[in-house]
Amino acid sequence: MRELSAPVVHIVDDDRDMRDSLAFLLRSVDIGVQVYATATEFLALYRADQPGCLLFDVRMPDISGLELYERLVADGVTLPVIFMTAYADVPMAVRALKSGAVEFLEKPFNRQMLLERVQRAIADDVARRQQGEQWEDVARRMSDLTERERNVLEMVLTGVPNKAIASKLEITERTVELRRASLMKKLDITSAVELIRLMTQYEIFSETRRSATAGKYGTAATRQDTHHPQS
């Protein structure tokens, strides 16, 4: 797996004093920081491949923090977000949390609490990315399997014994054993139990990724239809 780059907290707040204060606080504990005065500036400079978290002011002049994050979610960005506001109310908090917010903080907030929330959000994001890298590696190894090895794999996963596999595929039992050994070597596992566990977890990951992709493009399509109604 490739090594992740250093985490960065992206602060988007139109209040310069607040931006500077938060940046100083986070850098004092060796957390990387990028600051932006507007959502537009953030969108122009943000790199989705960088781990970390988002620290958004809710009310901003061009695009609100909530609208900004909802746009990122629609584009498939999964970085944790902490919202800040001096004008908190229940509907706003509900909307923020439904959009995927980690935390919703009212200004002025306790700085130590903010640090704890940021550090936890970063740790969660790094762990999620590392897990994603792990399963991407499994996907690459899966792509190395031949069609014949895949046929054997499918039957092994359904509990079919080697003798029955050989009969169904019209090959010798020794050939089944060789293909089974080859696919297990490619997947870097040593037992049938480990194989079943790996494939079960991989299927869960794949289904989650497919659902996220469908949600991303479904949201984008809905947004496009809303903006461009048919005549």
Image (spheres, rainbow, N blue to C red):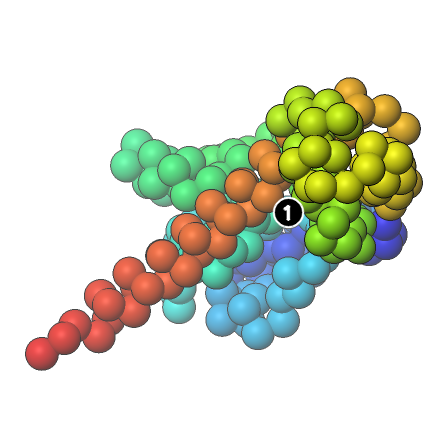
Asked if 115 appears above or below 66 in the picture, the reply is above
- Whole-percent x and y of residue 101? 49, 39
- Residue occupying image coordinates x 77% and y 54%: 146
- Residue 111 seen in the current view: no
**Residue 215 left/right relative to 33:** left
- Whole-percent x and y of residue 227? 24, 71
**Residue at numbered disc 1:** 53
- Residue 43 seen in the current view: yes
- Whole-percent x and y of residue 10? 64, 55
Q: Which SS class for mark 1?
A: strand
**What residue occupies the far left of the structure in this picture?**
231
- Residue occupying image coordinates x 43% and y 53%: 214
Asked if 36 appears above or below 9 in the picture, the reply is below
**Residue 69 left/right relative to 194:** left
Asked if 231 appears above or below 207 in the picture, the reply is below
- Whole-percent x and y of residue 145? 78, 51
